[in-house]
Amino acid sequence: MPTVISREHLLRAMSADTVTLLEALPAAHYAAEHLPGAINIPGELTANDAARIAPDPHRTVVVYCSGPGCSRSTVTAAALSRAGYTDVRVYVGGKADWFAAGLPMERAAAAR
């Protein structure tokens, strides 16, 4: 089971810029709204993708998805751990918890 991170700890890590934040949802969900600074992982994460997206395997990586009922974040976190990442955490509350707390979301620009 991956290490869980709370919203409060995630906010502190984001403020200190000590975390790489990944959204494990389809691209359309990411485009509609995502946590500030998150990078989209719309499907299965390969080791090559991980190295490109998060080049430092010792930096904290936090993965989230839609909320507690979504398992995509834990699947992506497991892939990161298998790829050698040493500090992988899951924000179980995901978008639902973030939104319920009234925190800001970002939207992706429309593809041209």
Image (cartoon, helix red, strand yellow):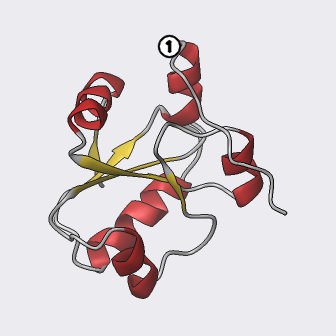
Give the farthest residue toward the front: 112
Q: Which amino acid does the dot numbered 1 rest on? A: Ala
Vertical side of 68 occupied by 30: above or below: below
User: Secondary structure under badge 1?
Assistant: loop
Question: Image point 80% across, 60% down: which residue?
Answer: 111
Vertical side of 102 occupied by 104: above or below: below
Give the farthest residue toward the bottom: 48
Q: Position of residue 46 (x, y in %)?
A: 46, 83
Within 10 Å of disc 1 (Cα), the crowding (few <14, some 14-19, many 20+) is few
Judging by the rendered image, the residue that carries numbered circle 1 is: 101
* Residue closer to the observer: 102 or 93: 102
Question: Image point 29% across, 22% down: which residue?
Answer: 8
Q: Position of residue 100 (x, y in %)?
A: 57, 15
Number of marks in the image? Answer: 1
Q: Position of residue 91 (x, y in %)?
A: 39, 39
Q: In the displayed structure, does residue 45 sit left or right of residue 91?
A: right
Q: Residue 76 appears in which quarter of the rendering?
A: bottom left
Vertical side of 7 occupied by 46: above or below: below
Vertical side of 59 occupied by 34: above or below: above
User: Quarter holding the C terminus?
Assistant: bottom right
Q: In the displayed structure, does residue 60 sit left or right of residue 80?
A: left
Q: Position of residue 90 (x, y in %)?
A: 36, 47
Question: Image point 66% across, 49% down: which residue?
Answer: 30
Question: Image point 29% across, 78% down: which residue?
Answer: 82
User: Quarter holding the N terminus?
Assistant: bottom left
